[in-house]
Image: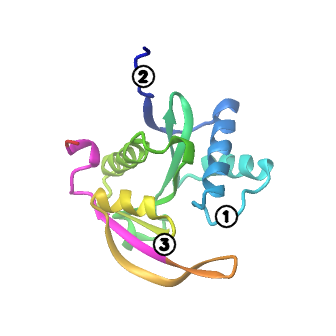
């Protein structure tokens, strides 16, 4: 008999992507898009476009890229987006965008871990609130947000169009004076 080994998961903010990480991130992105999740893309773009997208994310000063790894392979991602410098009224909040876990990496706690890392980083940066929006069809993401204290405050009945179908979008916020998922016992 073989002992079951659990995969290793980790989450981190990164400022550069080597070629292996870029390849992993593009593969995970493609899988997530094909599974119906994220970015506004309905079909995966060409590999060159994905690579340019991820390189571009790293160039935007207001964006911080987080990746989640399953056995050292990037399998998840999200971005924290700081308010623009001229938006004094919204300096207290930060946006969470482009959150996904590749379908083949789900079920290992990676979503909760990367979300917790991002929330902790937002607290470290002294933000008081986080905001996000999500398509109604991203039911697993919605479950993760709601299980981790995110509050749905609104609905746009015409948020996205996929094929001929109009989808709702939900808007969430989380006040960061609440404990992060990493602080809550499981």
Disc nearer the start of the sequence (3/1): 1
Q: CA distance from mark 1 to mark 2?
A: 35 Å
Q: Nearer the viewer, mark 1 or mark 2?
A: 2
Disc nearer the start of the sequence (1/2): 2
Residue 46 percent across, percent down from the top left: 80, 53
* Residue located beneath label 2 in the image: 5
Residue 21 percent across, percent down from the top left: 63, 34
Quadrant of the drawing holding the N terminus: top left
**Secondary structure beneath label 1:** loop
* Residue located beneath label 3 in the image: 136
Q: Nearer the viewer, residue 117 or 56?
A: 117
**Secondary structure beneath label 3:** loop
Q: Determine the residue positioned at 49% across, 64% down.
A: 138
Residue 159 percent across, percent down from the top left: 54, 79
Count residues near mark 1 (Cα–Cα under 10 Å), then give few for <14, some for 14-19, many for 20+.
Answer: few
Q: Which mark is residue 114?
A: none
């Amino acid at each position: 008999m073989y002992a079951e080994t659990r995969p290793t998961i980790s989450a981190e903010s990164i400022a550069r992507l080597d070629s292996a990480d870029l390849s992993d991130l593009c593969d995970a992105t493609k899988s997530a898009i094909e599974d119906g999740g994220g970015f506004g893309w309905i079909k995966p773009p060409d590999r060159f476009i994905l690579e340019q997208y991820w390189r571009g994310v790293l160039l935007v000063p207001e964006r911080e890229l987080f990746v989640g790894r399953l056995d050292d392979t990037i399998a998840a991602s999200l971005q924290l987006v700081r308010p623009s410098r001229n938006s004094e009224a919204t300096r207290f909040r930060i946006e969470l965008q482009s959150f996904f876990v590749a379908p083949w990496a789900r079920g290992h706690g990676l979503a909760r871990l990367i979300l917790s890392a991002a929330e902790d980083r937002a607290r470290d940066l002294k933000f008081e609130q986080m905001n996000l929006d999500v398509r109604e069809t991203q039911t697993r993401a919605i479950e993760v947000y709601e299980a981790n204290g995110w509050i749905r405050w609104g609905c746009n009945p015409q948020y996205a169009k996929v094929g001929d179908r109009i989808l709702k979008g939900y808007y969430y916020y989380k006040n960061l004076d609440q404990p992060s998922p990493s602080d809550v016992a499981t």
